[in-house]
């Protein structure tokens, strides 16, 4: 894998980690274990992602997240608890994949990976706050299902087609910015509506 492909995969996984961290850790671990992504050489502790126990625990976490994300208001509590965890996880995933030799580049990759995960996590949490204002649970399940499909598709594209992973990362970034803006608009209008009552 070339440098552009590695950066694209790292960016894509970091963005997706803001939505589904545990699924991304499991997918990265499986990809490392089966040779789709090279194990990191400079930061050998990160090859722990390929450990079967880590993959198993991440799989259990992914299942818990999948279920928690479907329950109205509990999903917002879950997101709140993961506000620090997801950006750190996204940063470590980026660092594990890029495996930069230069310590300065490692810091850059760590910060960019964490920033990408924080951006997508913020968009997810904001969208969920807006969706949770709806009194029926169907919209929450639909939004969660959409996130599941996008995450699975994004993981598959980033890991199986690394030459287009940078395009996936750019699309995810633009989508996250759009969702943040739309969520902000909805929540602002809801707040005005409530204040007028």
Image (cartoon, grey):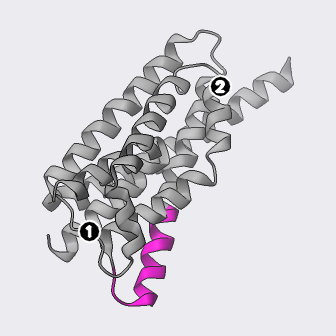
- Image position, residue 81 (x, y; %): 67, 42
Give me the residue at 40% from left, 33% from top.
147
Q: Which one is earlier in the sequence, the residue at label 2 or at label 1? A: 1
**Residue 42 place in picture, x, y as percent:** 34, 82
Q: Is residue 160 left or right of residue 65?
A: left
Residue 167 appears in the rendering: yes
What residue is shown with label 1? 39
Nearest the camera: 41 or 16? 41
Q: For residue 118, what is the image quadrant?
A: bottom right
Q: How much space separates mark 2 and mark 1, taking CA atoms?
A: 36 Å
- The residue identified by callout 2 is 74
- Count all numbered tags in the image, as a single digit: 2
Residue 8 location (% of width, % of height) = 27, 64
Magenta span contains residue 107? yes
Q: Secondary structure at mark 2?
A: helix
Magenta span of residues: 100-115
Residue 22 or residue 168, whichever sits in front: 22
Mark in front: 2 vs 1? 1
């Amino acid at each position: 894998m070339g440098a552009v492909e590695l950066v694209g995969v790292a960016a894509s996984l970091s963005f997706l980690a803001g939505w589904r961290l545990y699924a991304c850790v499991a997918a990265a671990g499986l990809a490392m274990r089966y040779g789709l992504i090279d194990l990191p050489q400079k930061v050998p502790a990160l090859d722990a992602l390929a450990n079967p126990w880590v993959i198993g625990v991440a799989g259990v976490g992914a299942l818990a997240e999948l279920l928690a994300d479907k329950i109205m208001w509990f999903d917002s509590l879950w997101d709140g608890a993961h506000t620090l965890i997801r950006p750190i996880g996204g940063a470590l995933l980026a660092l594990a994949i890029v495996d930069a030799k230069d310590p300065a580049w490692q810091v850059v990759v760590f910060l960019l990976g964490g920033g990408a995960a924080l951006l997508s996590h913020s968009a997810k949490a904001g969208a969920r706050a807006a969706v949770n204002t709806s009194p029926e649970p169907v919209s929450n399940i639909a939004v969660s299902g959409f996130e599941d499909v996008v995450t699975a598709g994004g993981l598959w594209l980033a890991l199986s087609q690394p030459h287009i992973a940078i395009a996936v990362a750019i699309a995810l970034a633009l989508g996250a910015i759009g969702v943040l803006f739309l969520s902000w608009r909805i929540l602002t209008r809801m707040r005005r509506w409530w204040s007028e009552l």
